[in-house]
Structure formats: structure tokens, C-alpha cells
Amino acid sequence: MKVEIVRDTGTGYFGTTTARTNVPQGKKLELTMQNLCSTLGIKKIYWTISSREAKYYRPDGPYTYQSASNTILELSEKVAEKYANKKA
């Protein structure tokens, strides 16, 4: 099932959280990858630095090195697929 993302048409005040604002963005991405890998039973994530100082990640298994955001997207698709198949 695909989830639709739509703009909220409400006007006026809305609340936001300041939770975890002290955690650096890179650490948040790594924590997200760890959570997704844990759900999938993956025990290691490898990382490397490119010649241009970019950090790339590869979960253990049939994955390739890619950016943190692309790794998160791929892992989240695997989690969604795993749980969709359990319900089918």
C-alpha cells in the first residue's frame, strides 16, 4: 500500500517538537539506518569515505555503498515489503 503525502489545508497555529534537536543530522541518519537494519536482522553497516570526503554506507548483505539517505530509502522499502508480505 502506498501512502499519500498531502499538504495540510489547516490555517493558523500548529505545534512542533524540539525533541532530538541536539543530535547532529549525520548521527540521526546513522541511528535511522541502525533501527531499520535491526528490524531486518542486519547486524553490521559498513562505511567508507570517498576521495571527495563524502561518507557512504553499505549494510551487510547484498547491498552496495550509497549515501545515508539512499541507504535509508532502500532499507525502509525492504521493511515495508517484509511487513506487507506478512499481512498477505
Image (spheres, rainbow, N blue to C red):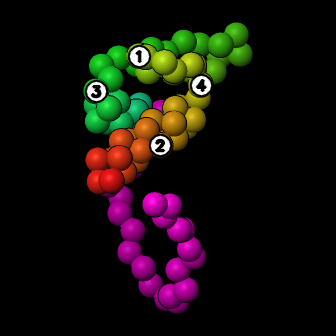
Left/right placement of residue 8 relative to residue 22 reads right
Left/right placement of residue 49 relative to residue 3 reads right
Residue position for label 3: 41
Q: Which residue lies furthest to the front in this view?
A: 88
The amino acid on which the numbered mark 3 sits, given as a three-letter code, is Gly
Q: Distance between the residues labelled 1 and 3?
A: 10 Å
Magenta segment boundaries in residue numbering:
1-28
Q: Which residue is drawn at 39% across and 68% down?
A: 16
- The mark nearer the N terminus, 1 or 3, is 3
Q: Residue 77 carries which label?
A: 2
Disc 2 on helix, strand or loop? helix
* Prevailing secondary structure class for the magenta stretch in the rendered image: loop
State if disc 2 and disc 3 touch (CB < 8 Å).
Answer: no
Q: How far apart are marks 2 and 4 (CA)?
A: 15 Å
- The mark nearer the N terminus, 4 or 1, is 1
Q: Which residue is drawn at 51% across and 36% down?
A: 74
Residue position for label 4: 66
- The mark nearer the N terminus, 3 or 2, is 3
